[in-house]
Amino acid sequence: MRVHSFFGAALASLVASAALADPTPPPPPPVVATAAAQIQPPMNSLDFAFYECDGAALQVMYDGDAPTHATLVTSDNRKYALARAASASGVQFAGGGVKFWTDRKSIAVEGTRIPIRGCKLKAH
């Protein structure tokens, strides 16, 4: 009867551990959004974008394909160094009281010495 009691105890142990086991797999780890996964601003292969605006022009130089920094150069030859900032939609860069935002279709610029309005992306 030892064989029978050994198998009975093993089976009871297996059933008990299966009952305690959680049948659902653990959730996957959270996905951390990176700059590369976010929307990126329009740029040419050299990480530049050029805009023709109402009475002005704007050049934007990015620090790479998934930029964290941008330099704006306005037609009055002023440079503005900006860092990527949080944005509910689109892409925003800000610094020194200047903001640049784009959703890849339009842009908004605030805080430059000359007004930047009515801009269209210039084809490269």
Image (tube, rainbow, N blue to C red):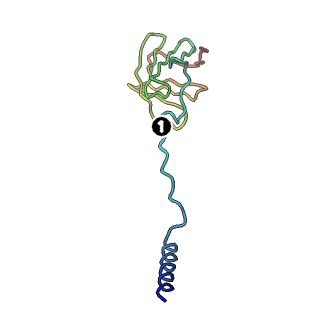
Q: Name the one closer to the observer, 58 or 26.
A: 26
Point 53% across, 29% down: residue: 40
Question: Could you tell me residue 102's position as x and y percent?
Answer: 54, 27
Question: Could you tell me residue 8's position as x and y percent?
Answer: 51, 83
* Residue position marked by numbered label 1 in the rendering: 34
Q: Name the one closer to the observer, 108 or 4.
A: 4
Point 47% across, 82% down: residue: 6
Point 49% across, 30% down: residue: 92
Say what secondary structure mark 1 lies in: loop
Q: Name the one closer to the observer, 35 or 106.
A: 35
Determine the residue located farthest toward the left in the rendered image. 96
Amino acid type shown at disc 1:
Thr
Q: Name the one closer to the observer, 48 or 51.
A: 48
Question: Could you tell me residue 27's position as x and y percent?
Answer: 51, 56
Quarter of the rendering containing residue 82:
top left
Q: Is residue 42 left or right of residue 94?
A: right
